[in-house]
Image (cartoon, helix red, strand yellow):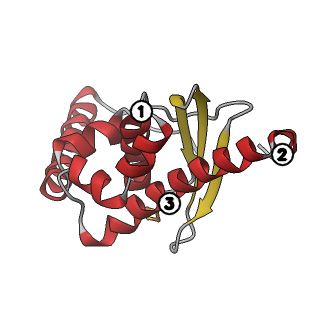
Amino acid sequence: MTKKKKTAAEETDLDKFTLELQKQIMEQIRKRYSETAIDHWQNPRNFRKIENPDGYAKVKGPCGDTMEMFLKIDKENISECGFQTDGCGTTIVCGSVSTELTLNNSFTQALALVSADEILKELGGLPESDVHCAQLAAETLRRALADYLYKKKSPWKKHYNRT
Ligand code: FES
C-alpha cells in the first residue's frame, strides 16, 4: 500500500492542531506547577553521574522510582553534586533543586538545609500526589552525605564503591 502524501493544507491543519494541543497541555501544567518547577523540568541541573564520588546513595521510593546522588566533597565543601533517576518529571525537578540547594555548601550546612520541606518551599509547593518525589530527593541526598561520613571514617571503603 502506498502512503498518500499530505497536502500543504493538511500539514498546516496538523501543525495548528499540534500547537493547540501543546498550548493546552502547558496551561494544565501551569495550573499545577510553579514556573520554577517548570524551569527545572525543562532544564534539569546536574543531571549526571559523577565518577568516583566521595558520597553516593541510591534509594527506591514508595512508588518504585529510584534516585541516585553523587557528591564530591573538597575540604568539607560540596564541590560537585549530581543525580540520576528513572522517575517522573517531578522527581527530576526535585533532584535538580536538591543539587542546587546543596552545591557550594559545607557538609553540615547541606545536611541542615536539604529536606523535603525546603525543596517544596523552593518550588512554591507541589501537588499532594507529588510530595513523595521531594521526600525521595531529600532522603537520597541525606544518605549520600551519610555515605561520605562512613567512607571518611574508613577510607579504604571508597575502593568498594559499587558505582
Ligand atoms: S512519581 Fe515516584 S518519585 Fe516521583
Query: Label 2: how many residues lie within 10 Å, few (<14), some (14-19) or many (20+)?
Result: few
Which sits earlier in the primary sequence, circle 2 or circle 3? 3
In this picture, is 118 found above or below 103?
Answer: below
Q: Where in the figure is residue 117, as x and y percent of width and height?
A: 29, 60
Q: CA distance from mark 2 to mark 3?
A: 22 Å
Residue at the disc numbered 3? 139
- Of residue 4 and residue 99, the one placed in the foreground of this image is 99
On the image, numbered disc 1 is attached to which residue? 105
On screen, 146 above or below 79?
A: below
Disc 1 crowd rating (10 Å Cα; few below 14, some 14-19, many 20+) is some
- Using residue 156 as the reference point, say whether residue 152 is left or right of it: left
Q: Residue at x 63, y 35 (%)?
A: 49
**Residue 28 appears in the picture as rendered:** yes
Left or right? Give the position of 28 relative to 94.
left
Q: Which mark is residue 124?
A: none
User: Which percent across, then down, holds residue 116?
Assistant: 35, 60
Q: Identify the image quadrant of the N terminus.
A: top right
Pointer 2: what residue? 157
User: x, y (%) of residue 10?
Assistant: 25, 36
Residue under the point 51% across and 72% down: 63
